[in-house]
Amino acid sequence: MSQNGKMIRKKDLNFWQRIYIPEILKGLRLTFMALFRRKITIQYPEKRFTPPDSFRGRPVLVEENGVERCVACGLCSRVCPALAIEVQANETPLEKERFPERFEINMVRCIFCGFCEEVCPEEAIIMSKEYELVFESQQEAVFGKDKLLVPIEKVRDRLEFLHKHR
Amino acid sequence: MFETAIIAGAKIVLTLITLLTLVVLTVYTERRVSAFVQDRVGPNRVGPKGLLQAVADVVKLLMKEDIVPKSANKPIHDLAPMISIGVAMSTFAVIPIGSTMEIFGRQIDMMIADVNIGILYVLALTSMGVYGITLAGWSSNNKYSLLGGLRSSAQLISYELSMGVSIIGVLLISGSLELDEIVGKQASSLWAGIPAWNVFLQPVAFVTFVVAAFAETNRLPFDLPEAEPELVGGYHTEYSGLKFGLFMLSEYVNMIVASAIIVTLFLGGYAFPWAGQFGLSGNSLALAEVLTFCVKTGLVMFFIIMIRWTLPRFRYDQLMRLGWKVMLPIALANLVVTASILALMKWA
């Protein structure tokens, strides 16, 4: 509101606003109406939040016909700002020729930015809707392929969302 | 002599228990209402609808370690919460919550002490309450606490004045310092069935008194002594466990007492409007009166809570300006006008 230290006021308060009591009553009416508004709290352990498709939960690897889509190009690991992803490539007789022998995401480091998903040329790593991540140790927080691989059927929503909006 | 002592003791115990229960309920209401205003649900896990949440909080406070800062003035640090709570609770002694009830063939006044200078007693004690806060702030040896304590005393001095002056208008009308009589004066009807409550006779005094009461109880538009964002918690920053609990308790007791006094002075006290038409008498009338008093006090408390979640805190200079430049002149003008009208009525 101030320019060169000078207060610029659009309009002075009128008499009733200066008296302040009508304004208090207005405010009270607002808060009183608010008492009856719909509550947004979700009673967590009993009821759970179903995220929209745009939600960025934990990153997962898409598994198609029993094989991961990933070709171990390493782009995700390069782009990851938190250095959470580690990929080790190897050869495979399949058509894609390369596959990740080891694929680890350190969930303690992951910041859920979704850069890996954005950069992936194969749509092989995408953000799921899972948000309940609990570990009891640092070691446990390093998710290997066993935990990361998710069948494609389970992540259709997200894939469709990506096709539509990217 | 012995009998009156027993009756007074019973009354005191009953009042204490009721007050403590009410505090628990008030804390619960405050949290629920605040949650509802903010589209939340609030405590709803402990007990049915979360009613036992405050009890759980009390248990937690009791079990917490009592920490006293190394360089604090220990005796005063201990004394401060006691002053706060003692003063807050004993104020309730003169507030009449009903006329008289007949129990075991005895007429029993529905107040602890029938003091003929009741309102002076209330004023004196409420201004004592600031000692608790100021001493707490000073003895903690913490800058934030000290600031909180200082603010509290400055605030009290500026608002005590307009509070007292606005009460004088009421006293002029009722012609007595006795709370019971002030209520009795309000029980009659003005015209067209409107009860002769002092709100209608002294609307300006009502507004100034309510504002001053907010300042006196450190409730939100004037909660500068504790101002969490600026003072970390103000005078009770260095308190923990039970002693912190006592401050908390006294704050809420003060709120209850303030609403009870507002009701007694301005909203007809325990007087049950249109009581004559229902043909109540004796004990049933007394019960109706107690109920009326509770409902009125409850509504005022709800209002106080709602104000807390509606208005932002005043800046310190705004607080002082409002106190000295607005409230005091208005209260004085109201006093002069009331006095002259009363004098004219006597003369005419």
Image (cartoon, rainbow, N blue to C red):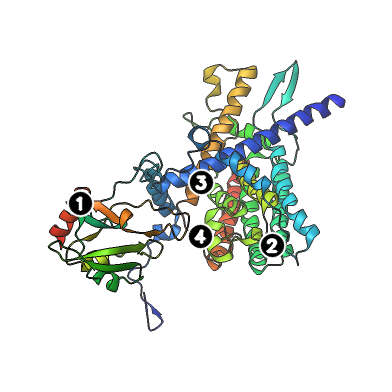
Quote the CA–CA distance across marks 2 and 1.
69 Å
Residue at 55%, 23% (x, y): give it: B275
Comes first in the chain, label 3 or label 4:
3
Quarter that holds the N terminus of chain B: top right
Which one is in front, B122 or B299? B299
Chain where mark 1 sits? A
Comes first in the chain, label 2 or label 3:
2
Secondary structure beneath dot 2 equals helix
Label 2 crowd bin: few (<14), some (14–19), many (20+), radius 10 Å: many
Identify the residue position indicated by label 2 in the image. Answer: B137
Chain where mark 2 sits? B
Residue at 12%, 62% (x, y): give it: A95
Q: Position of residue B164 (x, y in %)?
A: 65, 52
Secondary structure beneath dot 1 equals loop
Quote the CA–CA distance across marks 4 and 2.
20 Å
Comes first in the chain, label 4 or label 2:
2
Quote the CA–CA distance across marks 3 and 1.
61 Å
Secondary structure beneath dot 4 equals loop
Task: Name the front one of labels 2 and 3.
Answer: 2
